[in-house]
C-alpha cells in the first residue's frame, strides 16, 4: 500500500461577503488564492444577490455566527495571512477585530469595502467609525481607493497624486502600518497606486485598461497581496506582483464572455495558460 508525502501549503483566510455572481467578494478571493497556489479558507460576513448588472439584495450574517466561523478556522488551520473585504456593519467589524486579537498576530490586509462596483452600499453608516477605530490599528496593510480613503478620513477625495500621498500618510496615522492608496478612480492614461510604509513612498504604475470588465478588482488585488504575503513575500514586492496579476487578469477579461454588465476579471488565466502568476 503506497502513501503520499505531506505537502506544505501556505494558507490564507478571507473574511468577506458572498457575491452570487462570482466576480467579487469571497468567490474572487478564493479564485485568487487558488491562482497563487495558496489554500484558501473563508469567513462569510454577508450574502448578496448580485450579478454583473447590479446589486439586488444584501443580508448580513449574524455577528455571533461570524465569530464562530472565525474561531473555527483559526483554532485549526495555520493561517499565514488574513484579508478582510465586505464587513457589512459595526457589530461584525467588532467581532472580527476581537477574534483576530485573541490569537497570535498575523499579517492582516484590510480592504475597506463600502460600495459595490454597481453602486450599491455594502457597509452600514456605523461601519466607517468601527473600521477606523477597531480594525485599522490591527492592519498590516490598508488598501482603500480614493473614495474610501476620503470616507475614512472624513474629507474630500484626493484630486492629485500629491493629495493621495498625503491621505495615505494620514491613514497610517490612524494605526495601519502601511497604506496602499489605489489610483483606479483617478483620470489619465496611467493607473498609479501609492504605497506608504516605514520605507517611504512607493509608486506602482501600469497603463489604464479600458473596457467593461473590472468587477471585483479591489477584492482581487488585496487577495493577491494576502496570498503572496502568506508565502513569505515582502510587502512592496507583494504589492508589485499583485498589481501585475490584476492588470493581466483585467486585460485577459476583455474576451471573457461572462455577464451582461460590468464583468469579472479572468482570475484563472494563468492556470489555463499553464503559467504561474508573475514572479
Image (spheres, rainbow, N blue to C red):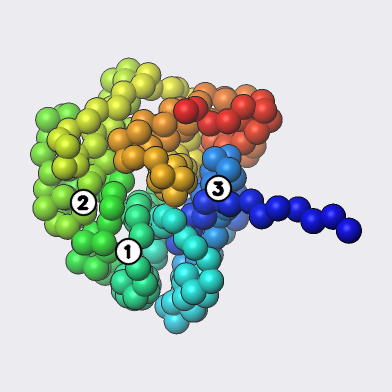
Q: What element carries label 1?
A: loop
Report which residue position mark 3 lands on.
38
Separation of marks 2 and 1 at Cα, in angstroms: 13 Å
Separation of marks 1 and 3 at Cα, in angstroms: 20 Å
Q: Which quadrant holds residue 193? A: top left
Q: Is mark 3 on a helix, strand or loop?
A: loop
Residue 106 location (% of width, % of height): 36, 60
Residue 85 location (% of width, % of height): 41, 56
Which residue does the image show at 42% across and 55% down from the upper left?
Answer: 81
Do the numbered discs 1 and 3 sit on residues whose CB atoms are within 8 Å? Answer: no
Q: Specify whether 211 is left or right of 96.
A: right
Closer to the N terminus: mark 2 or mark 1?
1
The N terminus sits in image quarter: bottom right
Q: Residue 240 carries which label?
A: none
Q: What element carries label 2?
A: loop
Closer to the N terminus: mark 2 or mark 3?
3
Question: What crowding class fits label 1: few (fewer than 14 Cα within 10 Å), some (14-19), or many (20 or more)?
Answer: few
Q: Which mark is residue 177?
A: 2
Q: Specify whether 75 is left or right of 92.
A: right
Q: In this rendering, which labeled residue sits more in front, label 2 or label 1?
A: 1
Separation of marks 2 and 3 at Cα, in angstroms: 24 Å
Do the numbered discs 2 and 1 sit on residues whose CB atoms are within 8 Å? Answer: no
Which residue does the image show at 34% across and 40% down from the upper left?
Answer: 234
**In front here: 233 or 256?**
233
Report which residue position mark 1 lands on.
105
**In front here: 65 or 22?**
65
Q: Is residue 89 above or below residue 186?
A: below
Amino acid at each position: 500500500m503506497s502513501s503520499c508525502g505531506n505537502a506544505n501549503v501556505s494558507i490564507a483566510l478571507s473574511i468577506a461577503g458572498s457575491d452570487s455572481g462570482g466576480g467579487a467578494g469571497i468567490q474572487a478571493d478564493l479564485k485568487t488564492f487558488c491562482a497563487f497556489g495558496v489554500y484558501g479558507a473563508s469567513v462569510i460576513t454577508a450574502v448578496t444577490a448580485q450579478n454583473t448588472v447590479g446589486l439586488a439584495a444584501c443580508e448580513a450574517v449574524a455577528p455571533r455566527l461570524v465569530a464562530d466561523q472565525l474561531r473555527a478556522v483559526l483554532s485549526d488551520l495555520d493561517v499565514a495571512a488574513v484579508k478582510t473585504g465586505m464587513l457589512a456593519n459595526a457589530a461584525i467589524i467588532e467581532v472580527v477585530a476581537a477574534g483576530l486579537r485573541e490569537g497570535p498576530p498575523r499579517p492582516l490586509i484590510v480592504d475597506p469595502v463600502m460600495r459595490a462596483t454597481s453602486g450599491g452600499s455594502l457597509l452600514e453608516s456605523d461601519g466607517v467609525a468601527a473600521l477606523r477605530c477597531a480594525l485599522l490599528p490591527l492592519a498590516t496593510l490598508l488598501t482603500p481607493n480614493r473614495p474610501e480613503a476620503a470616507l475614512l478620513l472624513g474629507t474630500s477625495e484626493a484630486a492629485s497624486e500629491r493629495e493621495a500621498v498625503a491621505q495615505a500618510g494620514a491613514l497610517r496615522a490612524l494605526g495601519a502600518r502601511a497604506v496602499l492608496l489605489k489610483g483606479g478612480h483617478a483620470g489619465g492614461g496611467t493607473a498609479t497606486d501609492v504605497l506608504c510604509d516605514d520605507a517611504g513612498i512607493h509608486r506602482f504604475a501600469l497603463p489604464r485598461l479600458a473596457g467593461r470588465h473590472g468587477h471585483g478588482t479591489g477584492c482581487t488585488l488585496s487577495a493577491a497581496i494576502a496570498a503572496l504575503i502568506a508565502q513569505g513575500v515582502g510587502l512592496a514586492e507583494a504589492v508589485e506582483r499583485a498589481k501585475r496579476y490584476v492588470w493581466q487578469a483585467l486585460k485577459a477579461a476583455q474576451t471573457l464572455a461572462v455577464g451582461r454588465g460590468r464583468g469579472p476579471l479572468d482570475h484563472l488565466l494563468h492556470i489555463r495558460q499553464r503559467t504561474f502568476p508573475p514572479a
